[in-house]
């Protein structure tokens, strides 16, 4: 259906999930008005030889500033047309519109097309009545002990290995110099510190390091693995010279009340164990809750037709690529591998937005303020201080989104059966 405004005619020409196309026609009379307005502006501003400011003939101004007048008029007419399109079509744009097929001839209507990404409307025939399973991993004494050992390892200082002549072992820190060999001569030597066995160095390089005691050097040919992050180096062989200078090991602290006090505000080692168990149980509960939320979204998507528009998938992939700092040469491969994950994310967001909108579950200003006050109390700072900090970091929308999702999932799970196992 075509709806006409007093001056601008807007006609939908294309509709696909996630995108809309609209043809715009501005009649010559409205074009003339916009050009006359722009001409008047430049007449007031013009400084032309032989004329006082604002007194130059309009015809001379039009000739002198023709391109600027057309550009100004065009910008005004496009802005006016976009406002009319938003109102007429009730659009929910995700981006600014693109302009296509622009025709701007003297004495003729101005015509062009808007192409804009929009959030697609979806319908959920079924959003409840599902059977969901919630499984929280039991926190055993062994798991608590393992976590405490990890804390112990993190707190352990690096000290020189007891036997200076001893060769390094996995888990030890090695300070070394690595230089590229050119015609047998070392070039561009660089110092490194590597913890052996953590996968931060090429495995073949680590094998050579394990053979050297402090003070020893060796030449070796190192082949970069086929999955090396820098594609240009994959499969290449480099001749290098290794020189090991120092080997350090972690000195693990004694487990006891003193260690507990060093870790945090604990009176005894038993208090530390209890706190570690509680944290692990909370983590297990969060993971179980996240899995239930994943299940309900998957079942809703399976029971309904929920599109994953290409434009939205590409936006998610671009965000992933920025977050993971994917080099440009790897973008296509990354997009191919992560496309299913991006599509699932788009469907999830569309479902959550639809449920929030349909049931009035958007986070309110009061709920955001209450959450900020709660977080401020935990951090022992003033709510206003935290609010200003979140606002400056552009994270208030993120907090609002979190609260909305909590309300939506509470609503969805109330309509299904959740069984704890």
Image (cartoon, rainbow, N blue to C red):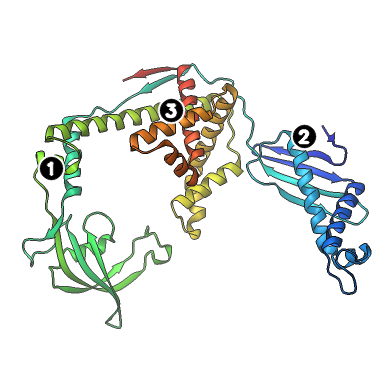
Q: Is residue 318 above or below residue 372?
A: below
In this view, the mark in front (2 or 1): 1
**Of label 2 and label 1, which has the lower sequence position?**
2
- Give the crowd class for mark 1: few <14, some 14-19, many >=20 residues within 10 Å: some
Question: With 56 as the anchor, is 147 left or right in this view?
Answer: left
Q: Quadrant of the C terminus?
A: top left
Distance from disc 2 to disc 1, alpha carbons, whole Å, reads: 68 Å
Q: Is residue 229 above or below residue 242?
A: above
Using the image as rendered, state which of residue 237 and residue 173 is in the foreground. Answer: 173
Q: Which residue is mark 3?
A: 293
- Give the crowd class for mark 3: few <14, some 14-19, many >=20 residues within 10 Å: some
Q: In percent of the image, x 26 and y 60: which residue is there?
A: 203
**Of label 1 and label 3, which has the lower sequence position?**
1
Question: With 405 as the anchor, is 60 left or right in this view?
Answer: right
Question: With 278 as the anchor, is 401 left or right in this view?
Answer: right
In the rendering, at what x and y percent does residue 409 appear? 47, 25
Q: Which residue is mark 2?
A: 88
Q: Which residue is mark 1?
A: 259
In the rendering, at what x and y percent does residue 251 appear? 11, 53
Q: In percent of the image, x 86 and y 64: which residue is there?
A: 66
Using the image as rendered, state which of residue 189 and residue 221 is in the foreground. Answer: 189
In the rendering, at what x and y percent does residue 193 appear? 24, 63
């Amino acid at each position: 259906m075509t709806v006409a405004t007093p001056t601008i005619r807007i006609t939908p020409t294309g509709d696909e999930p996630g995108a809309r196309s609209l043809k715009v026609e501005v009649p010559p009379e409205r074009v003339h008005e916009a050009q006359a307005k722009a001409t008047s502006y430049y007449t007031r501003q013009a400084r032309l030889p032989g004329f006082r400011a604002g007194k130059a003939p309009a015809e001379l101004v039009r000739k002198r500033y023709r391109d600027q007048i057309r550009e100004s008029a065009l910008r005004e007419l496009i802005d006016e047309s976009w406002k009319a399109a938003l109102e007429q079509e009730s659009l929910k744009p995700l981006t600014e519109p693109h302009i296509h097929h622009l025709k701007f001839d003297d004495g003729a209507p101005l015509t062009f097309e808007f192409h804009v990404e929009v959030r697609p409307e979806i319908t959920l025939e079924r959003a409840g009545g599902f059977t969901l399973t919630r499984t929280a991993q039991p926190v055993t004494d062994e798991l608590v002990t393992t976590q405490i050992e990890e804390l112990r390892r993190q707190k352990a200082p690096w000290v020189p290995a007891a036997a200076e002549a001893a060769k390094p072992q996995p888990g030890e820190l090695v300070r070394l110099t690595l230089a590229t060999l050119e015609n047998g001569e070392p070039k561009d030597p660089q110092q490194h510190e590597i913890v052996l066995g953590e996968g931060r160095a090429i495995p073949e390089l680590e094998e050579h390091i394990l053979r050297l005691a402090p003070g020893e050097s060796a030449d070796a040919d190192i082949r970069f693995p086929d999955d090396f992050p820098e594609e240009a180096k994959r499969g290449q062989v480099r001749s290098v010279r290794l020189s090991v200078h120092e080997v350090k090991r972690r000195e693990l602290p004694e487990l006891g009340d003193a260690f507990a006090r060093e870790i945090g505000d604990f009176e005894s080692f038993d208090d530390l164990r209890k706190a570690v168990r509680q944290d692990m149980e909370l983590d297990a509960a969060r993971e179980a809750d996240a899995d239930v939320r994943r299940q309900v979204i998957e079942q809703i998507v399976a029971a309904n037709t929920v599109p994953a528009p290409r434009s939205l998938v590409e936006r998610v992939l671009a965000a992933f690529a920025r977050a993971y700092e994917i080099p440009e040469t790897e973008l296509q491969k990354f997009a191919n591998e992560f496309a299913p994950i991006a599509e699932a994310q788009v469907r999830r967001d569309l479902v959550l937005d639809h449920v929030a909108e349909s049931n009035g579950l958007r986070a309110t200003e009061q709920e955001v303020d209450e959450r900020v006050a709660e977080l401020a109390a935990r951090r022992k700072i003033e709510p206003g201080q935290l609010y200003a900090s979140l606002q400056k970091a552009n994270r208030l929308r993120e907090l609002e989104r979190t609260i909305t999702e909590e309300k939506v999932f509470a609503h969805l799970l109330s309509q299904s059966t959740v069984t704890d196992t």
